[in-house]
């Protein structure tokens, strides 16, 4: 079991931030599946699902399918994707793997439905952030305080991880797709 914490946004709406706890099962060397919960909810609110595949598997996908996936390179190298409670050495080894992965993520409980007692509406494709300045610093600060983290220090500790280029077709939201 792998526990990750990070941020998503509704595809096409980078301002609609979703803070996400990922509880993941490692299915194989190329495939991880995660149940996503909203942090700080009691009882825990199941928000969606993320499938994570290796870069090698992503490269085999047809271009039409690749549009549904987002890269993890920036999330890993920036320290936005974290493993609360793990020692730096363990974190680094896991992130060496995750830096070359891609996620296909659906949220079934809308980001703005805090007052609803059941999930309403159609499932939405969500994406991950890919550059500085896309996510408000206050969102990251709140998360860091919640878990007693410093994402800047975490990113610095990962600075020696080789970050591969994003494979063509991922992060299609940047081109107005999906």
Image (tube, rainbow, N blue to C red):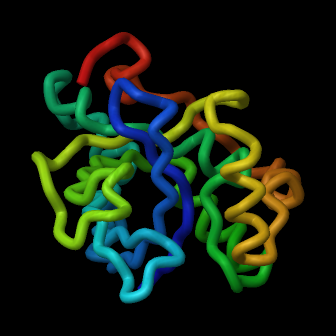
- Seen in the picture, residue 75 relative to 150 is either above or below; the reply is above
Q: Quadrant of residue 135?
A: top right
User: Farthest residue toward the left?
Assistant: 122
Residue drawn at x 43%, y 41% as measured from the top left? 9
Query: Closer to the camera, 42 or 153?
Result: 42
Q: Quadrant of the N terminus?
A: bottom left
Query: Closer to the camera, 174 or 18?
Result: 18
The reply, left or right, for residue 64 in relation to residue 138 is left
Q: Quadrant of the C terminus?
A: top left
Query: Closer to the camera, 79 or 13?
Result: 13
- Seen in the picture, residue 60 relative to 2 is either above or below; the reply is above
The reply, left or right, for residue 24 in relation to residue 89 is left
Residue drawn at x 61%, y 58% as measured from the top left? 81
- Seen in the picture, residue 27 relative to 53 is either above or below; the reply is below
The reply, left or right, for residue 82 in relation to residue 53 is right
Residue drawn at x 46%, y 52% as measured from the top left? 18
The picture places residue 98, in percent across and down from the top left corner, at 52, 57
The picture places residue 13, in percent across and down from the top left corner, at 41, 28
């Amino acid at each position: 079991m792998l526990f990750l914490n990070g941020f998503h946004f509704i595809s096409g709406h980078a301002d609609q931030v979703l803070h996400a706890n990922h509880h993941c099962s490692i299915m194989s060397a190329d495939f991880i599946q995660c149940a996503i919960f909203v942090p700080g909810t009691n009882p825990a609110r199941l928000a969606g699902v993320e499938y994570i595949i290796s870069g090698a598997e992503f490269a085999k996908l047809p271009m039409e399918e690749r549009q549904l996936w987002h890269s993890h390179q920036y999330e890993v190298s920036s320290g936005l994707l974290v493993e609360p409670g793990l020692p730096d050495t363990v974190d680094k080894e896991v992130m060496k793997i995750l830096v070359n992965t891609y996620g296909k993520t659906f949220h079934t409980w809308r980001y703005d439905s805090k007052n609803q007692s059941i999930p309403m509406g159609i499932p939405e494709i969500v994406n991950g952030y890919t550059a500085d300045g896309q996510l408000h610093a206050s969102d990251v600060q709140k998360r860091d305080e919640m878990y007693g983290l410093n994402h800047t220090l975490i990113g610095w500790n990962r600075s020696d991880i080789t970050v591969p280029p994003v494979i063509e077709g991922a992060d299609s939201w940047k081109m107005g797709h999906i």
